Image (spheres, rainbow, N blue to C red):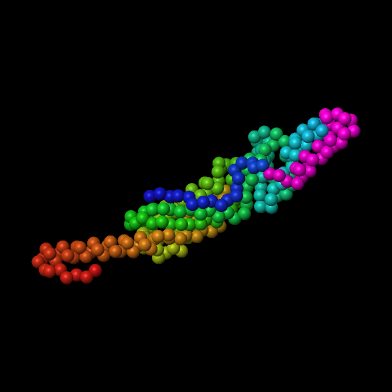
Amino acid sequence: MSTSLIRTRSGVPATEMPRVNVVSAAVLITPVLLGALVTWLTFNPVGVIVGLILGLLLSQSPKVARQWERAVVLRLGKYVGLRGPGLFWIIPFVDSISAWVDQRVITTSFAAEETLTSDTVPVNVDAVLFWMVYDPEKAALEVQNYPQAVSWAAQTALRDIIGRTSLTDLLRGRERIEEELQKLIDELLQVLFVFFVMIAVEMAGADKRSHASSCFEDSRAFQLGVDFCHRIGVDAQLNC
């Protein structure tokens, strides 16, 4: 039995990523131009050098968060608050952004491969989970990698549901399986400060497993009938 993650489309970076915005570019260019002007008037290269250093330093301060994002800001390693959406400023080399939290609905695809049902029939089940972060602060500070944690929690719940469900119930009651899976995943995601939205389950390859299982049972019954006829001395004329 193996459970594998297909892919996760989250767009939630765990650490600060280099971002270029118009305000940073303007803050960088302005001191450089002023320094170049001073150098041109005084014929002294110190002006442009100071302007370049000052521009590089100040350009680290302005940040822009998109409408669906929240930035988790740390000051000397200590949490000071959430920033965004829109323009906000940080102190260069003192403040840092530990995470950009995406608050849109995120889709995560996962699968349970060759997972045994309660009647020991291996099945492949694919599922798609729709979820969103409702507490960006706690999700970023108290969970190391919450997108991955969500994926593994969903896979664990799916494998648990399959393990205590027979193949017949799995095929006939997909809606009931989805309801049970929703309740279980919702309980698991509460500790990750993530809000469960919806899940869709598809029984990949389960119909073939069911057909193979019934064929095996028919052939076994046929063989038992033949053996019984031989024991009582009757010529077996059976059709399967």
Q: Percent x, y for residue 232?
A: 10, 66
In the image, residue 49 above or below residue 228: above
Residue 214 or 19: which is nearer the viewer? 19
Q: Nearer the viewer, residue 42 or 64?
A: 42
Instruction: Give the residue at x 60% y 45%.
Output: 13
Marker count (numbered)? 0
**Residue drawn 67% across and 33% down?**
76
Residue furthest to the left: 233
Q: Is residue 27 left or right of residue 9?
A: right
Q: Residue furthest right?
A: 41
Magenta stretch encompasses residue 118? no
Q: Which residues are magenta?
A: 19-47
24 drawn magenta: yes
Residue 91 percent coordinates (x, y): 73, 37
In front of the other: 90 or 4: 4
Q: Is residue 39 above or below residue 101?
A: above
Indicate left or right for 138 with 155 as reference: right
* Main SS category, magenta section: helix
Identify the image quadrant of the C terminus. Answer: bottom left
Report whether residue 138 is seen. no
Which residue corresponds to the image point at 83% horizontal and 38% vertical from the top-left?
A: 33
Instruction: Give residue 4's position: percent from left, percent from top.
Output: 45, 49
Q: At 67% from the left edge and 38% from the top edge, which residue is drawn? A: 96
Residue 2 can be seen, yes or no: yes
Residue 142's quadrant in the figure? Answer: top right
Instruction: Find residue 68 and report its horizontal and vertical position in percent.
Output: 66, 52
